[in-house]
Amino acid sequence: MAKTSTRAQSPWPTLGLWAFLRRELAFTPERWQATLRLTLACTAATVPIMMFKLHIPLLTMIVMYLLTKEETTATLVGTLGGMIGVTIGLGLALLVYLSALDITWLRVCLIPAFVGGGLFLNRILVLGPLGTAIGLPAAMAMIVPDIYPIPGILDRFLIWLWWSIVLGLGINLGVQLLLNPGNALDMLVQALRTRLQAVEASIECRLATANGAARAGAAPAVSALALSGVASQLALLKMVQLRSASLRPYRLELHALIMGVDRLVTTAAALEAVGPVSLRAPVRGRLQRVAQACAQVRHAIGHRHGPDAFVAPQDTSATTEDSVVLPLLAEMERVLATISLAWPGRPSGSATAQPPVEAAAPRRLLVPDAFSNPEYVRFAIKGALAATLCYVIITAADVTNEIYTAVITCMVCSLSTIGASAQKGLLRFTGAVLGGTMGVVTCLYIFPHIDSLGGFWIPFSVGTAVAAYVNFGSPRISYCPRCACWPAWRASPASPWRRQGSSARRTTCVSRSPRTLTPSDNGSRKRSLSRVGRITTSWPS
């Protein structure tokens, strides 16, 4: 019997993974539009990469994936913050190069200093990613002398590094501003309307099941919306306050509205998990009124006015059949009644309603407990220790040139909890495996048959589009494609790592023709190597 039971349960993990992937990779028009914009930006960036012969085109692509958001204000803020942070970090590294490059022990000690400082700034700054943008380039610049041990080019290498990052940020920002018509307020309104529509559809499905009738049509899954949480909507609310000064006085009301809608979604998901039960006529009537109130709130949010009516909680004696449904129903009625109190302006939704007078919150650069919370210091020390140990191991094994990105992994995967760090590390490992497979297949079966720039753009755009589509998914999988593109881009003809020999990897630049990077016969190989010899002295000055 035990053996039979095990066989019966064995297919469930596979089915669960398939259902998870279907849910995470679901098609939406907004997702396809964002994918198209990011793919266009990455493809357009290959032109200046080859034109200016950038030695680090990989960073140009990576920063696009890191800072591209579905909303233009967030992309603009992230781009400006990234440019400022990278400039400060590389400026500090250049100062070290000019004053103490020959002192090896000091340069090694500065690696944990920059990593820990960046992680500490990530926690105490209101704009946390700015700390990472300062610490990560500065720490990586301390490792560059181990990868490119040529003193004459190290100072210029930092300038090329800065130019590669700024180029990617600038191209991505231009494409997003030109092709992305959406703003934070419209996206927030659409997110709230979608959630209310899902609650309404879930209740109507419950009523149709209780009446023995089948309900036609599809609706957003309320359980999936409940699992997604409110982090994205709260982030959109911050962008709304940053962009729309007229909505800043309604910050608390809008926050309460978001939380109220999320409570409705969570309660509707719990009601959906109860399963089909028979309902009495009074309970069905209350459910119908809740669905109508959700429709009114959804219409009011879409048209920027107060809803006409709200549902008040009712006390009804429960029977055995509907005793499980009544607590959830009462909770939804209480939430709908609370929304009337949290509605921006007066509950009547009058157009002349004035926002409440409250003292404006002071603009802060640091969080309130920046220097009083010991967890921030512990977090920075743990990340610095991990990065230092990783650097010592790869240096002792003499594989710094091959896997120097392990230090980046230590800093990027440093999160507040072990579970979050493990999840991000698993996504990074999965992405690296998938990206490595893509790179090997492309190098062996596609690039040898390419002899023009147009032919190179086809596989490049396809791979970038696939990664971009996954990148705009939920946080559960969005980090994976960024790591998948890393090895795939390194294998592309637009990458200097495709050159033959270690000296060529250090001293060559990007060719205009992918054919010279993947010679298929001895004659073309000799001509390619002769070109490499001619351009070894043609570094940009």
Image: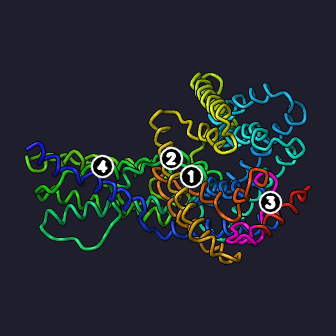
Q: CA distance from mark 3 to mark 4?
A: 58 Å
List the residue tagged with mark 1. 483
Name the spot of residue 482 as percent of width and height, x first.
57, 54
Q: Tell me the CA gap for discs 3 and 2.
A: 29 Å
Q: Which residue is mark 2?
A: 429
Q: Is residue 329 above or below residue 466?
A: above
- Mark 1 and mark 4 residues within 8 Å of each other at the beta carbon: no
Answer yes or no: do the residues labelled 3 and 4 have beta carbons within 8 Å? no
Q: Position of residue 310 (x, y in %)?
A: 34, 56
Sequence-first disc among 1 and 4:
4
283 up-or-down from 97: above or below: below
The answer to which image quadrant residue 419 occupies is top left
In the displayed structure, does residue 111 sit left or right of residue 507? left
- Picture quadrant where residue 41 is located: bottom right
Q: Amino acid at mark 1?
A: Cys
User: Percent x, y for residue 294?
Assistant: 34, 60
Q: Which residue is mark 4?
A: 267
Q: Where 202 sits versus 143, above or below?
A: below
First reached walking from the N terminus: tag 3 or tag 2: 2
Residue type of the residue flagged with mark 2: Phe
Crowdedness near tag 4: few (<14), some (14–19) or many (≥20) residues, C-alpha within 10 Å: many
Q: Mark 4 and 2 residues: CB-CB less than 8 Å, in contact? A: no
The label nearer to you, 3 versus 2, is 3
Which residue corresponds to mark 3? Answer: 509
Q: CA distance from mark 1 to mark 2?
A: 8 Å
Range of magenta residues? 505-525
Magenta residue check for 79: no
